[in-house]
Amino acid sequence: MASKHANIRPFRFGIQASKASSQKEWTELAKTAESHGFSSLTMPDHFTDQLAPVPALMAAANATKNLRIGALVWDNDYKHPVVLAKELATLDLLSDGRLEIGIGAGWMATDYVQSGMQYDKPGVRIDRFLEGLEIIKRAMTGEKFSFSGKHYTITDYTATPLPVQKPCPPILIGGGGPRVLKLAAQLADIVGINPSLKDGVVNADTISEMSAEAVTEKVDLVKQTAGSRMSNIELNIRTFLVNIRDSAEEAISGTANMFKVAPEMIANSPFALMGPPAKIAEDLLARRERWGFSYVIVGGEDVNSFAPVIKILAGK
């Protein structure tokens, strides 16, 4: 049967990690990820119990040779885009071109409340994010520019340093709602499919949007919006529910009971990977065929248990 995706990309895998109790623990995680064949190490960007992304990612890059680094994702509201652009370009320069720029409008309400920042409506945060992204991309060129928007004003600015990757490191935008998914399809090199986080918290609506049917609607929207540029887009998914064990049925039923949903929903959700490595590899192949997901990110806690899956899918 012919593939639904004419330009199937080879798999690559990442981990998302956030904490370590020492420099040794953090760098060993990065080294282990690279040795198992993971392509990237990513981090969240929140004010919760986690390491600060910029220094932690630089440490991970310094400890490895080929491991790519990035945030999943940087929150545009937490830093002025000129400041963030300088940090991103520096990361790309000092990692010899291994940065991926995951960036978004911000969603976690507690970050804003605890820091005293205004938690604007989604539309305002998205508008501000779009201005910030344009400034970051223009800063990466090294050409003097000015920018006048509703949220930012830049005057005769020439950014340094410049990134190794030209004209800009790959941009990853993840979306759960229609507006951001459409913007990602138009602007990003890597599009992440997310559940909805419009309420600023993970709740029942978030879980319901992890269904296969919800994901199909979102991927279809990205494809329709992207048009001919879809061939240049890498589709990404962060699998939040990973349970590698001999019995897939037990893993699925246990997770379904936890979230009070039908087992079939968990079994078919691309956000869940349940069972032994061989089954998970089969599921990933089927999901790439169905939706196009080739860039799959799991949690840092899965760095060792997921390694057999990477081995099975090497070169595929």
Image (cartoon, rainbow, N blue to C red):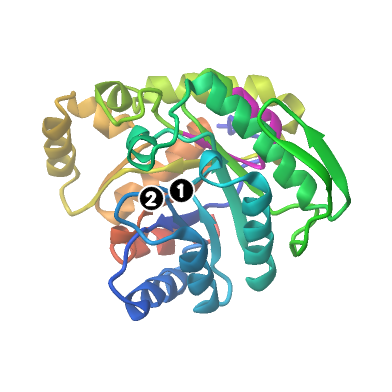
Out of 228 and 99, give the one closest to the viewer: 99
Q: Residue 180 vs residue 155: left or right? A: left
Location of the N terminus (image quadrant): top right
- Residue 133 highlighted magenta (yes or no): no
Disc nearer the start of the sequence (1/2): 2
Residue at image position (57%, 27%) is 126
Q: Which residues are magenta?
A: 181-193
Q: Residue 312 vs residue 54: left or right? A: left
Q: Residues within 10 Å of mark 2 (few under 14, many from 20)?
A: some
Q: Residues within 10 Å of mark 1 (few under 14, many from 20)?
A: many
Q: Where residue 151 sits in the image (x, y, percent)?
A: 66, 30
Q: Is residue 104 above or below residue 305?
A: above
Q: Is residue 181 visible?
A: no
Out of 96 and 256, give the one closest to the viewer: 96
Q: Where residue 2 sits in the image (x, y, percent)?
A: 60, 32
- Residue assigned mark 2: 281
Circle number at residue 296: 1
Residue at image position (36%, 32%) is 109
CA separation in Å, label 1 and label 2: 12 Å
Out of 117 and 224, give the one closest to the viewer: 117
Out of 47 and 156, give the one closest to the viewer: 156
Residue 210, quarter of the rendered image: top left
Q: Is residue 85 above or below residue 264?
A: below
